[in-house]
Image (spheres, grey):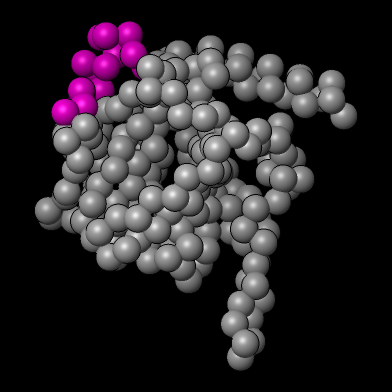
Amino acid sequence: MKIVPLSIAGAWEILPAQHGDSRGRFLEWYRVDQLTEAVGHPLRLAQANLSVSARDVVRGIHFADVPPGQAKYVTCPRGAVFDVVVDLRVGSPTFGRWEGILLDEESRHAVYIAEGLGHGFCALSDDATLTYLCSETYAPSREHGVHALDPDLAIAWPTGSPVLSDRDAAATSLSQAQAAGLLPDYQQCLGWTESLRLQAAAER
């Protein structure tokens, strides 16, 4: 398994080693020891989600208040998605930037997304299935969204006919979310990450 940092600090792509023969394939899609080494602290597993989407469905861009935020470890066991990480942390050197990663049932890649970053995806196949390991349970009062089609983000979604939920279609733009004080603060996110590292070190 290789864990490679993305261009947005706080996000990593995980490339598992696959072993196969005529019987099928085997891989380790999550290793707490290797993720901890890369990130600096273990993922606190509080909730596991699974979503199934039809082709051209776009979900996101979702994020949660920090602290505690919600870190995510995302992979696609069936079908394919274009997975997107967006830096929504006000004051970050890469604020407003996004990066897209192909997650599919062939490569079996995964993405780790730290607290404070936004996440979304576009389904590239029918029945595109994503699994999420989450550091916190779902808390509606702390959950927010930025419109996935916001021209200021200019995400190059690989579909000409994106299908959004009513909730996502009603999400605010990046500038509106910032003006309303909804976006995470970069320094606060760094402080939260450091507290997780210190806690992990104390528990060793």
Residue displayed at 35% across by 55% down: 52
When the figure is inspected, residue 95 is found, relative to residue 20, above or below; the finding is above
> The C terminus is located in which quarter?
top right
Q: Is residue 151 left or right of residue 74?
A: left
Q: Mark yes or no: residue 144 visible.
A: yes
Q: Residue at x 68, y 17 (%)?
A: 195
Is 136 or 118 nearer to us in this picture? 136
x%, y% of residue 67? 53, 15
Whether residue 111 is in magenta: the answer is no
Residue range in magenta is: 170-183
Q: Quadrant of the N terminus?
A: bottom right
At horizontal 65% and vertical 67% (from top left) the residue drawn is 27
Find the residue positioned furthest to the bottom: 22
Asked whether 173 falls inside the magenta stretch, the response is: yes
Q: Quadrant of residue 155?
A: top left
In the rendered structure, the answer to whether residue 103 lies left or right of residue 9 reads: left
Give the left or right position of residue 28, taking residue 76 as reference.
right
Which residue occupies the foreground of this view, 43 or 95? 43
Query: Which x, y percent locates residue 127?
Result: 32, 63
Q: Residue at x 38, y 50 (%)?
A: 51
- Name of the residue lying farthest toward the right: 204
Above or below 57: residue 70: above
- With 128 as the anchor, is 65 left or right in this view? right
Residue 150 seen anywhere in this rendered image of the structure: no
- Residue placed farthest to the left in the image? 161
Counting from the top left corner in percent of width and height, residue 28 is at 67, 61
State the image coordinates of residue 7 (x, y, percent, origin top left). Answer: 48, 39
Q: Nearer the viewer, residue 3 or 203?
A: 203
Instruction: Classify 186 as above or below 86.
Output: above
For the image shown, how many numbered marks are present on the structure?
0
* Closer to the camera in the image, 81 or 129: 129
